[in-house]
Image: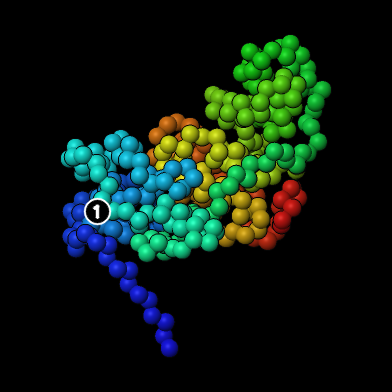
Amino acid sequence: MPRTVEKESKPVGVADTNFWQGKKVCWEMCHCPEVIKSECPAPRYPSFPCWEIEGTYCKLTPDGTGGQDTSICHFCRVYKRWGENKPIELKLFGKGINSFRKFLDEKARGLALPQNVVAPANSALLGERASTFPNTFRRRPEMYPQKLNEILDRHNGEQGALTKILKDIQDEYEWLPREVLDHVSQRLEVPTTKLYRMAIFGKGLSIIPRIHQVDGNVCVVDLVKYYLDFLQHDLCGKCLPCREGMYRMYQIVRDITRGEAQEKDLELLKEVARWVAELSACNQGTIVANIILAALEDFQWQFQEHLNGVGCPTAVCASL
């Protein structure tokens, strides 16, 4: 017997009209990638403008269980274009991503699924978001500790000279290896998170090597994964591109290091990175996305070897 699929019943109050008729739809104005369009309720309920729908991606709280904060709508290009300065009022409830997250939490506690909650067709972005940022990580042998200590001693270990210290270290190494940042953190008793932020966003500094700088011990794929894991928990998460983009890019790179990704995932990584670079509300998201795009361009061969069954060329990714 052929499998039948029941059409989702129309919510009470939903008209047959299409609000977006003759207008450029929000997911095109915001250049949302397919992975977000497939999750967000806005494309599935075109009778409502996006700012009237609870639980669209742009309204989600960081844990994904709240979706009623419309404050971002006042700054959104879509509302400014089509909202006609009318008061923002949520009118469609129980169809958003946040409702499905609440259902998952309730199901885990043995509660029943509410009748008005409809699961999205694809839940790729709704995986468990418990922090996987490690307290420690695998260390390779420290790189040139004598020269590094000479640089630190030259500045008398002063924390106030951190920017100058990092620039001098980069002049020596041509980039800022993770092990070096950790060594500086230990010597100066500075939180590693502070050094990572300075290294990532500092002008003229680089956490990813260029092609001519890399040696046989550096897996750039693993390095990108580590920093994306750090950044998805460290950035403010106020805008959709950073909040969802960092998380999705981390997922893809993590799967690559595990040997669980395909060629199409690498293309999706590039698409999401370009989307974050173009649409982040502040320059930090753009900087991170451009770092990822540069790594993909300079070290495509490393990413390809992880994908094509060759394995990790540096033997760092133990899952391969």
Percent across and percent down for residue 47 are 23, 57
Most foreground residue, 205 or 71: 71
Secondary element at tag 1: loop
Percent across and percent down for residue 128 are 55, 52
Most foreground residue, 170 or 78: 78
Looking at the picture, does residue 10 appear above or below residue 242?
Answer: below
Looking at the picture, does residue 179 appear above or below residue 308?
Answer: above
Left or right, 177 with reference to 294: right
Which quarter of the figure is the C terminus placed in?
bottom right
Q: Which residue lies furthest to the bottom in this view?
A: 1
Percent across and percent down for residue 119 are 42, 62
Left or right, 191 with reference to 65: right
Percent across and percent down for residue 34 are 41, 56
Q: Residue at 53% of width from left, 54% of height from top?
A: 127
Looking at the picture, does residue 71 appear above or below residue 13?
Answer: above
Q: How crowded is mark 1: few (under 14 residues within 10 Å), some or many (20 or more)?
A: many
Left or right, 111 with reference to 307: left
Amino acid carrying label 1: it is Phe
Report if residue 164 is visible in the image: yes
Which quadrant would residue 183 be assigned to in this image? top right
Most foreground residue, 138 or 146: 138
Most foreground residue, 86 or 173: 86
Q: Residue at 37% of width from left, 50% of height from top?
A: 55
Residue at the spot of label 1: 48
Q: Residue at 63% of width from left, 41% of height from top?
A: 133
Report if residue 25 is visible in the image: no
